[in-house]
Image (spheres, rainbow, N blue to C red):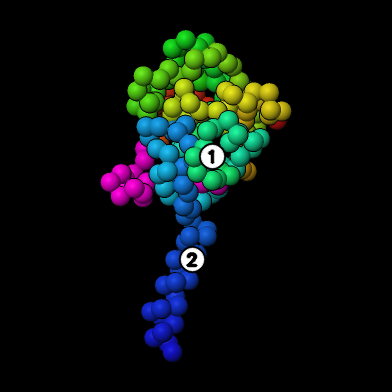
Amino acid sequence: MRDILLWCVLPVLVVLGLRLFVFGLYAIPSGSMENTIMPGDRVITTHLSPRPIALRRGDIVVFKDPANWLANEGATHNSDRLIKRLIGLPGDTVECTGGGAPIVINGVPIDESAYLKPGVEPSRSAFSVTVPAGRLFVLGDNRANSADSRAHTNDGAQGLVPVGDVEGVTFMRYWPLNRVGWLSAHHDVFRDVPTRTPTS
């Protein structure tokens, strides 16, 4: 009985514990993150963010649909979760003049060519948002087909995602097999962006 518990029951409990409290598995419902993640891809997230590990600009976050965003996503897979790249943290002012101009965070323009879908502008539309405490500004890597924070500025929360709705940070694709691999957050893109204290 002791051997059964040690070699059969204990490993199952460990795997279940990791699945429930450390790792999450998600299917990608739309093309808003192309070409980084394609529709139907399956990814692994860590539940250790936003707590105890702090979120960082560039993180690919999975979060609950805050205000019926999925209705505008053109989702091809059933899901009530979205996945986007975290661009603005609490306190950040995120803006763009549109027309091919770069995204500017706290006065610093960023070069997003490392992850934007080829041929897609940082933002076709102009916007300027200051992120309050407890909220996040997110964008898809396929800006031409992403109903992200820019598209929901009139949803009562300026298109900002509550930090508490974030379920994890994506770090790996595990399906399809020919695309298995690590996913980069490209934190270096944001290295020159200064930190600002959020307002309530």
Q: Are marks 2 and 1 in contact (CB under 8 Å)?
A: no
> In which quadrant of the rendered view does residue 63 lie?
top right
- Answer few, some or many: residues within 10 Å of disc 2's Cα (few below 14, many 20 plus, some between 14 and 19): few
Amino acid type, residue under disc 1 in the picture: Leu
Q: Position of residue 128 (x, y in %)?
A: 59, 16
- Relative height, residue 144 to residue 7 (above, below): above
What is the chief secondary structure element of the magenta stretch? strand
Tell me, yes or no, whether the highlighted magenta stretch contains residue 181: yes
Tell me, yes or no, whether the highlighted magenta stretch contains residue 158: no
Image point 41% across, 78% down: which residue? 8
Q: Secondary structure under badge 2?
A: helix
- The range drawn in magenta is 166-184
Image point 59% across, 24% down: which residue? 151
Q: Is residue 37 left or right of residue 195?
A: left
Q: Position of residue 169 (x, y in %)?
A: 48, 44
Q: Which mark is residue 82?
A: 1
